Amino acid sequence: MKIINKIILILISTLVLFSCEPQVLQPDATFELSFKKQGLTSVLAGSTFYVKSTGNGEFITLYDGNKYAEWNVPGSKGVNFNGLDSLPITYDKPGKYIVAVVASRATDSGIGLLRDVDTMSVVVVDIRNEITSFSIKDINNNVIPATISSDSTVTVSLPDNNIELKFAAKFTLSSLYSRAEVNGVVQKSDTTINDFKNNLTYSIIAPNGNTRNYKVKFVTFPASPLKQLHSFQLGLKSVGEIAEIDEVNKKITMSLNFATNKVGPTIIATSSKLTKISIASSSVLYNGPLSPTANYDLSKITAVKVTAQNGDVATYTFVLSQQLPIVSFGFIGLYPAPEVIINPTSNPKTVTINAFKGTDVTKLVAKWTGSLGVVKIGTDIQTNGVTVNDFTTPKTYSFYKLPSGSDSYIITVNVVN
């Protein structure tokens, strides 16, 4: 009897144990496609539709069928819904894609995994056959963009000095998979040359065969004769020197700060609208259009040319000079100002200051005009109008150029009656 009771007890315990095991909800990967709910059998390339999850799962992941997002392909990755009921998909390339939704749920405290997969095929049709941009380069290499109207007319307006209308048009299409043809010849953007003297028709053929024709026409207007240089200054590797422009005599005068090397600066210039600026030089290296990133040797520039839209050229003579390191020198707070003698031709170069009797020469703050570069006494950097020095004995100021090189002046202060 005791044995029977033990057996009954074990059976009861087992039943209780299994009755306490939680019921695991099976994952469900079912989903809907928005375009199919609208009664469509395919989706248009470039358009967006939505995948709506109608099932359940601890993790629900969408694989759109693109490369690296294909279900059950090593290395592919999907996108988790993360609590959203739908996710967008946009296909640019026509074709057939397999959309998969994977729903999964962990079991046995994370040891096991339940999974459900649902798939649908999506056919993508590309009917795009539009020109989205169209341009040419005129004889001065200016980019001339066209206007594209709703009636499929492409209009290019350019100056009348473009006598020959043979250009390689640069264009973009609404689909990478469409093609453009002119009289049956496939056109390659920025490569295929056509004569636009007579209106041409560009036929844009979509991957599905749909064709849209664009009439391309050219209209001309009088080219501008304006060719004035408005500004000319230095950029990088300079202290921003600005040149004087004599428009009457067509002359550019630039006074270079001592701190700036003649070799290396960039040039910033402006001129009349639709003009081009070029540098004429004693070296052929700089015989060409002004480049905002080029490093010029200012000593070799002979002229600056401004070419008008109609082809006329204005030539400005370029005259360069360089300032001395010190144009003026003095001390802050001394009144009346002492006599200052600057001798840039002596060897060594000197500045002599004859201060009045009673001047405390142990705490003088120098202020000068001229070099805007780094100035040092020995290894100590001097800040113009700030640094205090003891001029009981002469001090040698070294004026440095950008980025290297220097010139030195011996500064001597004499106290006179």
Image (cartoon, grey):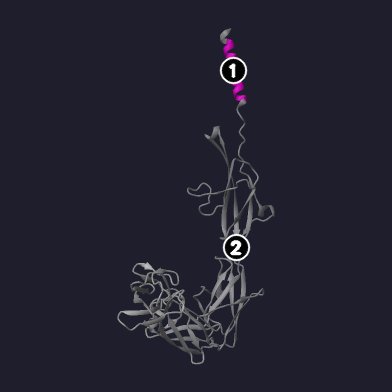
Q: What element carries label 1?
A: helix
Quadrant for the N terminus, please.
top right
Closer to the camera, 398 or 138? Answer: 398
Closer to the camera, 282 or 59? Answer: 282
326 vs 117: above or below: below
Of the numbered discs in the image, which one, if any, rests on residue 11? 1
Span of residues in magenta: 4-19
Most common secondary structure along the magenta stretch:
helix
Closer to the camera, 324 or 187? Answer: 324
Is there a contact, CB below 8 Å, between mark 1 and mark 2?
no
46 vs 186: above or below: above
Of the numbered discs in the image, which one, if any, rests on residue 47? none
Instruction: Give the residue type that dot 2 points to.
Output: Asp
Is 361 magenta? The answer is no
In the rendered image, the residue lying farthest to the right is 38
Q: Where is residue 189 in the image (x, y as percent from the top left)?
A: 52, 73
At a point 62% along the width and 35% down the height, the residue shown is 25
With 268 as the anchor, is 209 left or right in this view?
A: right
Q: What element carries label 2?
A: loop
With 5 as the anchor, is 352 left or right in this view?
A: left
Is 8 magenta? The answer is yes
Q: Residue 58: name its quadrant.
A: top right
* Closer mark to the observer between disc 1 and disc 2: 1
